[in-house]
Amino acid sequence: MPTVIIHISNEDPVLGEISDLPGVSDTMLFVKNPRRRDGKDLMHIDPNVMTVIWPLSRINFIEVMPSGEEEEIITHVRE
């Protein structure tokens, strides 16, 4: 499950996990374990919430964080 940083219009970035990257026909983004980039709870979401659904129309862009697998591949290629 990729960890992503979601940049939402007029809000602070949100860190979370998504099952799949959004496709061309998707209109919503399901984010599990939403939190601030420092790991703290989001002020506008109840602390007990585990999944949030955001419309893609509100999202400016998504950063995909490298997983351990990807870091190993990049490290190996650079050697």
Image (cartoon, rainbow, N blue to C red):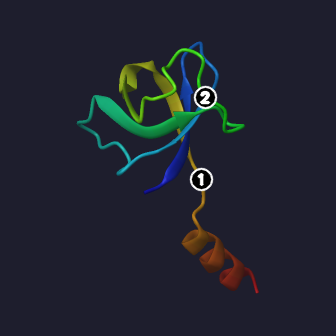
Write down the residue under mark 1. 65
Quick one: which residue is furthest to the front in this view?
48
Depth check, front residue: 22 or 36: 36
Q: Position of residue 40 (x, y in %)?
A: 66, 32
- Looking at the image, is mark 1 or mark 2 earlier in the sequence? 2
Q: Is residue 54 above or below residue 29?
A: above
Q: Position of residue 35 (x, y in %)?
A: 58, 33
Look at the numbered disc 2 and give the secondary structure of its residue.
loop
Q: Is residue 39 left or right of residue 46?
A: right
**Residue matched to label 2:** 41
| Foreground of the two, 31 or 55 | 31
Q: Residue at x 59, y 53 (%)?
A: 65
Q: Nearer the viewer, residue 79 or 41?
A: 41
- Identified by mark 2, the residue type is Asp
Mark number displayed over residue 21: none
Q: CA distance from mark 1 to mark 2?
A: 19 Å
Q: Position of residue 51 (x, y in %)?
A: 38, 34
Q: Quadrant of residue 37?
A: top right
Residue at (48% x, 20% y) in the render: 46
Characterize the local packing of mark 1: few (<14), some (14-19) or many (20 or more) Cα atoms within 10 angstroms.
few
Q: From this viewpoint, which residue is outermost toward the right? A: 79
Kindly state the secondary structure of the residue where label 1 is placed.
loop
Tell me the quarter of the picture where residue 56 sits: top left
Residue 14 at x, y = what percent?
58, 31
Q: What residue do we see at 28% from left, 28% from top?
A: 27
Badge 2 local density, few (<14 within 10 Å), some, or many (20+)? some
- The quadrant of the image that shows the N terminus is bottom left
- Residue at 57% across, 64% down: 67
